[in-house]
């Protein structure tokens, strides 16, 4: 007989379940309504308008793509000229975990050292400055865009001050600024966070609001705060295989996410659980390897701890460390229940 | 007051509604089940197995991609070496309606003349033969793959005999054979069709079973009947931005489509409606421009007919003809109701 | 003993010998002069200036690339945005004989029917017009550039009137116009030709003046009549592997070609020989398959003629015709001697 | 009046003059000989045979390309599958000075830390090992090839032992090994060097013998020791715009370089001069920043030294250092005269 105590607890990632119930309900209600294809439907139009309002960016162009790698490859390709590359943290998603999709599009990812997953304005300035001061720069890849993730792959956050400084460097060196918001809901829901959607719209040339990891079935909303930043972006999306025939499916999801503040609410569920788990971990003497305020928590476990905890909890493997410990990731999400959080804390 | 008579009838395309109710139901039932990401979940495994069985291809590799252009670009790129191109009908989807996605991947689409959207084995043999006989062929693009659609963009079907002949030419010239099955359910459901899934598996190197236009929310199942036809295809899919984090969403859909024969049933609904409409059109003297047995019907309308019918029925624009008529497409789908079909016939 | 009569006569192509003696002499004289690399040398500067003057284009940017396929791929890639393609004759060099180099750069070659190797303004207008009138054009490749060759691959010439008409269509549809002048010297030297270098500069967005087939060891001078037509073109050239470290080697050649009218003189040698051969062929009843005024002559030979003439003369194979004849190309060049021309005529 | 003392001495690079006199002479002698195009000529055949013999690689395929960036981009593209990248020193030419030509071909350059421009077998093993041990490696770029330069961009040399160790790691992890020999003559001519052409042929999958920087007008000989390592490489070369119509021009140069040991002799001229300069620099107390045995010497100059020496000697700028010194490069070449070397030493 299976007892509650022996059931596995799932904290490996934030894309292990389906979708927010409100989204399923809306898909069901609208299922047989007829609509135009390729994003020309009324649901997508409504979602775009709500996102514009949430961003205080009335002129913004908004496109619904399907996944993060696809959004990154499509946007970066569209924003760069052939001789340009994109600056990213050496630990950035495009640097490591997209099978070179940016390079497959013809562009170098220029990796910079990071701290807790974050780039500093100074590191970016130094990279761009070095390029522009170099007399042989015409033989080199020109930095044309800066890629950040908010939160980062390590769950950390850029502060508004940091983002402003980076944005200023970008403008100084005529580089675009692009923010990957795959987990943006978990940033927006953090008390520590002071970067709002309107801030992103004011400081970036483009960014995406992640759906896949924040409660949608799939989907990422790419926002260009200035109209026509990339002429013919629709065709570029289509060429990248990123255009949904039934664009409404993405539109309905984002329309729901941006109704009654659902997107941020989904984030808050995850952050509340993560905060409780973080407090319990600290109390019980676990070693957190990085100070993150969002839905990802990284702990270094010695072999015994690892074995014991793994029996009960599915966590994400992060890395083996020279000191013999293993870093594991505990991720909460919109789907994390109070009960599972209680059980996890009890199991620590 | 809006009366039934004046309500618009929607026959413009086969991707204007959501999805088959059974799919929505299954997504709802499984919504909070935990599963692994990127297609490693149990739903996707089950769907793969059912597809292997339906294709009598026990060794087949099956991947779930999101859309047709994406599937075409990814598969074609994976099947070709840099100096090779893909033969396609001049009217093929990859030739015309994908913003050059195949070329963006570095490969020439070699367009051949077609008849009713179909390529002949002879035209393919002539193209390949001309290349291999040319002494300067090392300066030319080598035909490395043949692309067909079943049904074609014009709604027509290859017969088993035709497909066998094309497959034989491909083997003779060491070219792969790839079939785009975006609307495959509407072929499989046709009484006139004699090409089964096992036939496709036996005669093609790869093909895809279309979901998006055949009742899924989205999704295409790419089948390689021989295991490891393309080593590391998973990574190629990821690089193309075609990998779903929540792979289960596609897996659940195809698992449902291949349960209780739902995929072919979805096709039959459309074909039954199309057959009734075709009969009515012929009876009322409309001019069908092409003889199609599937869910797409093409009629040439004079300006007066066009205006009258368009008021009541949303059709798809196809082309203007020199004789002053306009060719419009009437498409039925899995979602076409008997009532709407009745109304359309009454409106003719 | 080898006698004069049995020596082979070489008329297969125009790149079978080394270079104009004046070029070898100049390379020898300057051999040990020190100069800057990558085209920043004084020879290249002088060559650029002479080309600007010859083109009456004082602001022109001039770059020296190495070969024709490379020049085409680099220029076309630089002139197009990702969603755009290039219109070319179905018989154009980029359409047939460059192993898909344009597609490898991500762009579709949109092939149009031709007559004697030439595109008409009407065919171009129709293609561009069809695109812009199509409501689904955002799913299609946008025609962004027109590619012509002067002379064409069939040795024919565009008249000034024809070129003006094509240039006007390009401006009307916001497409660039690019002329491949691989054999331009043989056009400029023709009495029938009325398109001058200043005409090309006035009517095109970019064109190249061919060296390889017109008496240089190698090299093509890419001309952009308007300064900064393509920002950072130097870097694009480098990225395409088309930048010579010893740029001077190309610079010296073009500086020599544009001194004392050598370029056009080189063409005149070829045309004078070709005109004599054409007259002799006609007099002796040979069938010319196309009416060309330049250095390429195409004749249809029956098997007996073919065997007899091939014993004495190396010609270029062009195609087998359904009527059993073989079309062969006789090409003269800057290196064709009066004596060899006499011998060829005697051998006819 | 210009006196000897005030004449500039040119030591900035090794591609500032034309070519070895023997090459010019051979080009002149053969200038009007007829030959086939695209490398099918007798001169290229002879050069290929001599290179096979020099490499003790009787089955080797040899192709003559035009420049280094082009050779790198073409070879790397041909050796990799789409999901693979190339490991290189962070200071490697492909990492820094080719405007991202490798990325433009779709592949990531995986940069590794270096010492004096060199990669260690251990660093390569660690990179490949990390990839293969990573459970998420299917989301990452697979290391498929290792790129080295011999000599490196810093003028240093791999020893035979080091190269053997690297070759062993490559075989262990199924990666190709490619050596960029842009300045190979200057390695082969070094007494310190113990890596011969047969060693390269035995240990590498492919390498190129540099002509441009070693006394040719231009040209690099790409060697694949095993026949048909890359099927259809000719077409790949053509597609990359790297195929010379007058292939003989490269063939004649390499045929001359590999006659009477001219290639290594050209190197020896440079090394003899460099050795004298190195000795003088050390004697006079200059600070050499790196210990190089080849034709490139790097010295750190304080501002006063820099100004004084720059007035007389054209050197290559390398970098500014935090301590206020400037690193300059002195490069000798096949063209460096004893007289200029004397003058340079006198000016130190």
Image: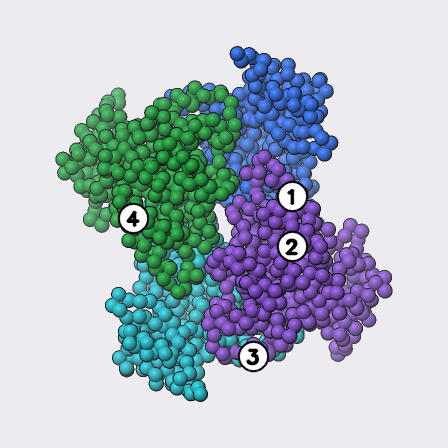
Chain colours: A cyan, B purple, C blue, D green
- Labels 2 and 3 in the same subunit: yes
Mark 3 or 4: the one toward you: 4
Closer to us: mark 1 or mark 4?
Answer: 4
Q: Which residue is mark 3?
A: B28
- Give the number of the disc on residue B127: 1
Vertical placement of residue D67 versus C3, above or below: below
Of callouts 2 and 3, which one flags the residue occurring earlier in the amino acid sequence? 3
Judge left or right: residue A90 versus residue A50. Answer: left
Q: CA distance from mark 3 to mark 4?
A: 57 Å
Per the model, the C-alpha gap separating discs 2 and 4 is: 49 Å
Question: Which of the chains bears the disc numbered 2?
Answer: B
The image quadrant of residue D75 is top left
As helix, strand or loop, the secondary structure at mark 4 comes to helix
Secondary structure under tag 2 reads: strand
CB atoms at circles 1 and 4 under 8 Å apart? no
Q: CA distance from mark 2 to mark 3?
A: 36 Å
Q: Secondary structure at mark 3?
A: helix
């Amino acid at each position: 007989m299976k007892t509650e105590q022996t059931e596995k607890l799932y904290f490996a990632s934030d894309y292990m379940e389906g979708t927010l119930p409100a989204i399923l309900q809306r898909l069901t209600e609208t299922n047989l309504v007829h609509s135009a294809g390729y994003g020309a439907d009324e649901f997508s139009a409504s979602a775009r308008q709500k996102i514009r309002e949430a961003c205080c960016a009335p002129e913004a162009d908004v496109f619904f793509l399907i996944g993060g790698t696809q959004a990154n490859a499509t946007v970066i390709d569209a924003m760069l000229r052939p001789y340009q590359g994109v600056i990213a943290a050496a630990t950035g998603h495009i640097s490591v975990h997209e099978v070179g999709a940016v390079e497959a599009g013809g562009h170098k990812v220029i990796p910079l050292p990071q701290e807790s997953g974050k780039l500093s304005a100074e590191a970016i300035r130094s990279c761009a400055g070095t390029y522009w001061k170099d007399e042989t720069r015409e033989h080199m890849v020109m930095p044309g865009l800066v890629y950040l993730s908010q939160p980062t792959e390590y769950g950390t956050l850029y502060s508004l001050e940091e983002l402003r400084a980076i944005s200023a460097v970008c403008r100084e060196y005529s580089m675009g600024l692009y923010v990957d918001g795959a987990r943006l809901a978990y940033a927006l829901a953090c008390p520590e966070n002071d970067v709002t959607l309107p801030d992103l719209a004011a400081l970036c040339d483009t960014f995406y609001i992640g759906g896949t990891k924040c409660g949608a079935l799939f989907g990422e909303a790419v926002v260009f705060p200035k109209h026509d930043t990339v002429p013919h972006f629709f065709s570029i999306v289509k060429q990248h295989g990123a255009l949904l025939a039934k664009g409404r499916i993405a539109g309905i999801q984002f329309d729901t996410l941006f109704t009654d503040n659902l997107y941020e609410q989904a984030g808050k569920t995850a952050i509340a659980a993560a905060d409780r788990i973080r407090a319990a971990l600290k109390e019980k003497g676990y070693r957190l390897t990085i100070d993150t305020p969002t839905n990802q928590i990284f702990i270094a476990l010695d072999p015994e701890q690892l074995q014991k905890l793994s029996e009960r909890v599915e966590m994400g493997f992060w890395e083996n460390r020279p000191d013999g410990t293993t870093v594991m990731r505990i991720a909460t999400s919109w789907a994390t229940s109070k009960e599972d959080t209680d059980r996890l804390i009890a199991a620590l």
